[in-house]
Structure formats: C-alpha cells, structure tokens
Image: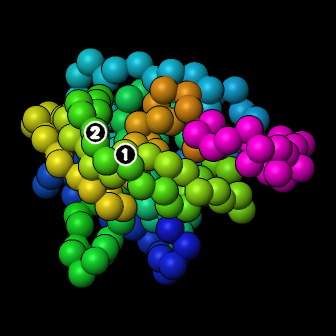
Amino acid sequence: MPKRRRKPKNTATSDVGGEDSVVLRETIPLQLRYYGDPVLRKRAEPVSEITDAERQFADQMLMTLAATGNGIGLAATQVGVLKRLIVVNIGEEDDEAYEPLVLFNPEILSSDGEIVAEEGCLSIPDVTADVKRPENIVVEGLDAHNEFVHIEADGLLARVLQHEIDHLNGILFIDRISGLKRRLLSDELQRLQRAERPS
C-alpha cells in the first residue's frame, strides 16, 4: 500500500533476522506483480516453519518495499509468492515512530468502528479510491524470530494491516469499493491489465 508523501530510498538494510541477517544493499528488488496477474487473486498458504530462508525472504520484501519509494506495506503475494507473510514500514505517523514490521501468518481477531480513507496499491499503480474499513483492529501473528506478536492498531497502521492481509486472501482494495466507483476506474484498470510488465 503506497503512502505518497514518503521520500524514496536508494538502499535498504534490515535486521529482522538478528545478528546473522543478510544485509541487502546490493540485492535486486523482488519483482512486483500487477493488476491482472492471476497470483494476486490466490489465497496464500500459512508458513509452517520460520527458517533462515524465510527470514531472508522477509528481508528481501522489506528491501523491495523501500525500493518502491512510496510503499508502506507489502504482501508476499505481491511478489508472486503464496505465503502468508506481510511487511509494513509506515515510518512516522502522528509524531509516533514505528519500526518495520514483519508478520508471518497474520490474523485479524477483532475489529470495531468504521472509517473511510484513501487507499492505493503498489500492484495497482496510479489508482486510488476511498475505502471504508474498521477503524480499530486486533491482529496476531509471528515475527521473524518465531515470537508471538499481538497488535492493537488504529489509524494508518490498522488500515495498512487490513490492506496487506486482504492481499493474502486474494482481495484487492478495489473489491471494497462500490460497483459505481469501480466502473469509474474501469478504463484505468483495463489499461493496467493490457500493460506489458517484466516477467
């Protein structure tokens, strides 16, 4: 999910794997998948074991997210991998700094409230729409160290978590807008489907 006011980054490093984590300064970003790619409509499978390979993949996802220049969330399905893994890096929001978040097998346990805000998506570039979502959520999952994580989120963090978990279930943000709004976006969406992308 993009956040347009964020400044681009040229390189990225991560310590999600601890002292032995791979520093991904020279690694080529993973290839993003775009609207029309069938993988975006598939449901991701749970990660049964968080190995060094899974941690390195999480590092690659964080680096790929940073390389986009405006992204704040990325799901594994968006790079063509059907694993239940998301990464989030919203930086600062409302004067609060957030550390990059890696979450394996995330699950929304509860939600309440309702709020409408604009959303976009790295997999649907240059398309935005107002989306209604729960305002407050509780999410659980595992971090890169196989530790249990419990998150009570609101604001931007809650929205990004919901957006990325939707990706793991084959749901795009445009599925959560009205039919009329989708029709208004139809020309742009058809253009994206026809666009040639790197394989």
Residue at 89% across / 50% down in the picture? 187
Check if residue 96 falls in the magenta segment. no
Residue at 23% across / 67% down in the picture? 98
Indicate the secondary structure of the residue bearing disc 2: strand
Query: Is residue 95 visible to the viewer in this orientation of the structure?
Result: yes
Residue at 74% across / 38% down in the picture? 179
Left/right placement of residue 80 relative to residue 55 reads: right
CA gap, disc 2 and disc 1? 6 Å
Left/right placement of residue 63 relative to residue 46 reads: right
> Of the residues shown, which amino acid type is indicated by label 1?
Pro
**x, y (%) of residue 186?**
84, 45
Query: Is residue 192 visible to the viewer in this orientation of the structure?
Result: no
Q: Name the residue tied to disc 1.
A: 134
Left/right placement of residue 131 relative to residue 126 reads: left
Find out whether the residues at labels 2 and 1 contact each other: C-beta distance under 8 Å.
yes
Q: Quadrant of residue 62?
A: bottom left
